[in-house]
Amino acid sequence: MISTQALALAREWAPQLLVAAGQTLRMTVFAYVLGAVAGLLIAFGGMSRRRGLPTLCRVYIEFIRGTPTLTQLFLIYFGLASVDIVIPGFEAAVIALGMHYAAYMAEIYRSGISAVDRGQHEAAQGIGMTRVQTMRYIILPQSVRVVLPPMANSAISLLKDTSVASLIAAPELMMRANDITSEYYMPMQVYLITGAMYFVMAYPLSLGARRLERLTGKSRRIGTDLA
Amino acid sequence: MNGGAITGGDWARAYEHVPYFLSVLWSGAVMTVIVTAGGFVVSIMLGILFAAFRTGRSRVLRGAAHVYVEVFRSVPVLTQLFVIYFGLGAIGIRLSPIPAAIVGFGINGGAYLTEVFRAGIEAVDRGQTEAALSIGMTKLMALRYIVLPQATRIVLPPIANFAIGLLKDTSLASAVAAPELSFNAHMLVDETYLSTQIYLLVAVFYLAMSLPLSTIVRWLERRAARGQRT
């Protein structure tokens, strides 16, 4: 398996994978920001008093969580193309993954907000704050501790899920790996190196997420000790 | 294909073919259930095995289980599938798509369930194991009759959640040509170019399978929460 010739070939394709890993990171960041912002809007929509809006948000969340990312990606990429809305692979993947994670992040925000004691709402409104002010100054700052660890875990899942974008030929690590495989026909070596690259990107993130979990868990305990 | 959807022509064409679509997607859905069930069983077995290693006394086995969990949770399942299907195929170990998918999802899922089972085992008070050992049970008996039954209540909700995730992830098996729901859908799209209509139908199929599961999860979670309070 490891001959000098294979090594020489690996020296040709390995740098290409490195470049593609950069594209994977870029896709992850864009989709994450889209998901975090859209997720917040959906979470607020779910708590809105406007009739129909909470139901709409609920239906969206259930649809997204009940169907595979792949199906959603194909609907956006191939489905929209059939009505002459052509979105390039990279952008389609960012939109599909971002809107997919928005549903999960909306649930994370919701649990974070509902973790804040109701008395905090009542007190804020009692001193004359508006609903928006209450959210902005009282509720959101306190829910950050609850929200941060699952948000960090979402980043890790998202990083891995970008690999699905290879199935619509969006430029990222997994697609590059497929291309290189068909060019050099060394699937075992190429996919193992690709896996190693994902590991190198994801593992530090998950160590960070775990540290965050410990940190916020501890601070919560101290909080109750003081109270 | 182009412009047809705006005039409604594509929808009319899709409507005519609905019985055909349903029969093709149905046979794909059956395969999706088979891959999900197969992957689930392998995941459970690996999860229990490696959780036993992870909580056991042997340092080597603990280390091996740790590496297994970290590596397989940090790499996309699609990459793992390709290593198993294309990678192993190139060095002479050729698996058909369905077994390859079951093995791939099973090994990947085992890493997640190892952590779930470990959490469940650790949640059971140590005194329970000590009491079991002191009345003469072997470590294996203590695990089988004392710890696992108590841990079950804790691990059931995350396991059911895992099953839902797995059901949706099996759509990736289409990339190694396993003839499940998503793969059959691609075939239909190649045949008819009715991508929007077919993928929406596929979404309905997945929803019909996953929504009942998530209702069960919610019920299990409520029950587990009740158990904790008492």
Image (spheres, coloured by chain):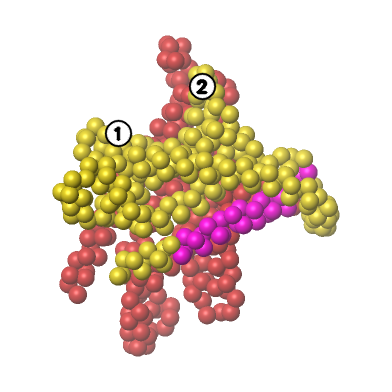
Chain colours: A red, B yellow
Label 1: which secondary element: helix
Percent across and percent down for residue A81 are 71, 48
Q: How many marks?
A: 2
Q: Is residue B176 magenta?
A: no
Which residue is situated farthest in the left direction here? B134
> Which of B81/A107 is in front?
B81
Seen in the picture, residue B10 relative to B114 is either above or below; the reply is below
Question: Which residue is rendered at x = 51% and y = 52% of the image?
Answer: B164
- Say which amino acid is labelled 1: Ala
Q: Nearer the viewer, residue B136 or A31?
A: B136
Please report, as a chain letter, where disc 1 is located: B
Q: Are marks 2 and 1 on the same chain?
A: yes
Amino acid under label 2?
Answer: Ile
Task: Give how far across and how far down residue B75 sits, in percent.
Answer: 43, 38
Disc ID at residue A84: none
- Image coordinates of residue A41 in percent, x first then y, are 50, 67
Position above or below: A112 against A90: below
Q: Depth check: A213 or B109 in front?
A: B109
- Residue B64 is tagged as 1
**Left or right for A194, reference B130:** right
Q: Residue at x 32, y 81 (%)?
A: A119
Q: Does the residue at mark 2 contact the one at mark 1 (Cβ under 8 Å)? A: no
Indicate the quadrant where residue B48 lies: top left
Residue at mark 2: chain: B
Instruction: Indicate left or right for B120 with B44 as reference.
Output: left
Rate crowding at label 2 as few (under 14), some (14 to 19) or many (20 or more) other CA atoms within 10 Å.
few
Task: Let me know if residue B204 is in the magenta part.
Answer: yes
Q: Which residue is mark 2?
A: B93
